Amino acid sequence: MALIVQKYGGTSVANPERIRNVANRVARYKALGHQVVVVVSAMSGETNRLIGLAKEIMPDPDPRELDVMVSTGEQVTIGMTALALLELGIKAKSYTGSQVKILTDDAFTKARILDIDQHNLKKDLDAGYVCVVAGFQGVDANGNITTLGRGGSDTTGVALAAALGADECQIYTDVDGVYTTDPRVVPEARRLDKITFEEMLELASQGSKVLQIRSVEFAGKYKVKLRVLSSFEEEGDGTLITFEENEGSMENPIISGIAFNRDEAKITVAGVPDKPGIAYQILGPVADANIDVDMIIQNVGADGTTDFTFTVHKNEMNKALSILREKVQGHIQAREIHGDDKIAKVSVVGVGMRSHVGIASQMFRTLAEEGINIQMISTSEIKIAVVIEEKYMELAVRVLHKAFDLENA
Ligand code: ADP
Ligand code: ASP
Ligand code: MG
């Protein structure tokens, strides 16, 4: 007997029929004698619909109230999933985040899980129930409803698996595993049987939304056995996230995958004095406003001034621009501050990069041959990321996928 956490995403619970499919799969696992915890997302499109409704009332919605609204999507699907299980004669009980007590901090719309109380779930599992838990939501120390950021149900699933000491966490979605890149953009993309945890972490952080990055972080921290599978197919082992690299790094593919992301915007602070403390003076107030900064570039100075460029989430560009214009520009005597949200980031990822040189130049040559201009570059040991004009994103992903021969194993 094993304890298994199964997470089903929005398309997997998009209508009553699909919810019945979920219940049937759970029933099969129960019949094998396993204990099952089910985590569900809102029906596909529902979270976007709720955000849209909020914005009709307040264009930049108050985050506490937004969380009160968007968390309702998952409350509907836990009830429906529990009903579908009851209809099959299976003992089932639904739980909201606060009923479990998934305790988070109070960063509404992007809260972090601090603690999970597993006692009620354990008691019900031992009594033979399937526990159906709402993904994406938690509760802060003051009893406020919080949500975990877009795609956060993945994190609920993995965090529950960690807290319960589950034998496996299965992420059921609308593709049958993790691919070399998003198969919707590159139809030749290839499913990977396994991928290292480090590579998955990079792919998720660079925008592959198949797993939310925090779910991968949880899996790494608590060594959760994590697998991505299709909820539409009965067979198939999906993709396993592994913790060991293959013995001898020469066996690893050089590049495992390509990620992309349209969610960032670029902010340039031009003509700032080239002197100590400037980076801090620019980024300090941005950090104080809880705005995450991703890539940062400072050019070599000329004539005593320099340009400073960094990226933030598109949703936070305007907020960051007003902070800089109001609190920073006069202070540091910057000539100009402007934002550009028509950018995209494309990243190639692979642990094999560690033992191979020339990957960056191959990437840059491939983009140059298509006339795609690179605006920013950042690297890590296993990743090279570039910022380009948004309209070239899909082209860049396709030509890179081909250049690195990812369609062939
Ligand atoms: P869910 O609603 O089940 O959480 P998501 O839409 O969040 O599903 O994530 C699954 C989607 O992730 C796929 O439909 C696919 O378009 C996209 N995706 C992006 N990168 C990859 C990748 N490398 N492998 C597989 N899917 C990917
Ligand atoms: N329903 C939430 C979202 O759309 C959480 C999730 O699907 O994981 O972002
Ligand atoms: Mg998702």
Image: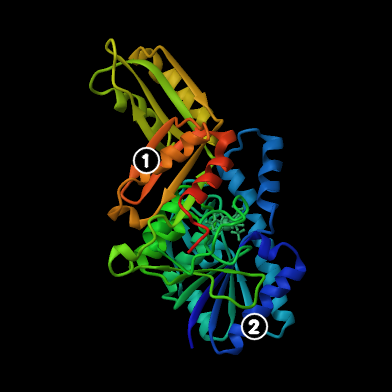
The residue where tag 1 is placed is 361
Q: Position of residue 54 (x, y in %)?
A: 67, 41
Judge whether 54 appears above or below 91 on screen. above
Label 2 to label 1: alpha-carbon separation: 52 Å
Q: Amino acid at mark 2?
A: Ala
Q: Amino acid at mark 1?
A: Ser
Mark count: 2
Residue 108 makes an appearance in the image: no
Looking at the rendering, which quadrant does residue 33 occupy? bottom right
Q: Quadrant of ligand 3?
A: bottom right
Q: Residue at x 41, y 32 (%)?
A: 376
Q: Residue at x 55, y 65 (%)?
A: 177
Q: Position of residue 310 (x, y in %)?
A: 41, 30
Respond yes or no on whether mark 1 lies under 8 Å from ligand 1: no
Residue with the most extreme front position: 369
Closest to the observer, 238 or 223: 238
Colouring rule applied to residues: rainbow
Looking at the rendering, which quadrant does residue 220 occupy? bottom left
Q: Residue at x 70, y 74 (%)?
A: 21
Judge whether 308 appears above or below 121 on screen. above
* Disc 2, SS: helix
Residue 138 relative to residue 357: left or right: right
Q: Position of residue 162 (x, y in %)?
A: 42, 69
* Disc 1, SS: helix
Closest to the observer, 364 or 312: 364
Judge whether 262 appears above or below 118 on screen. above
Residue 85 relative to residue 253: left or right: right
- Disc on res. 27: 2
Residue 209 makes an appearance in the image: yes
Give the crowd class for mark 2: few <14, some 14-19, many >=20 residues within 10 Å: some
Q: Nearer the viewer, mark 2 or mark 1?
A: 1
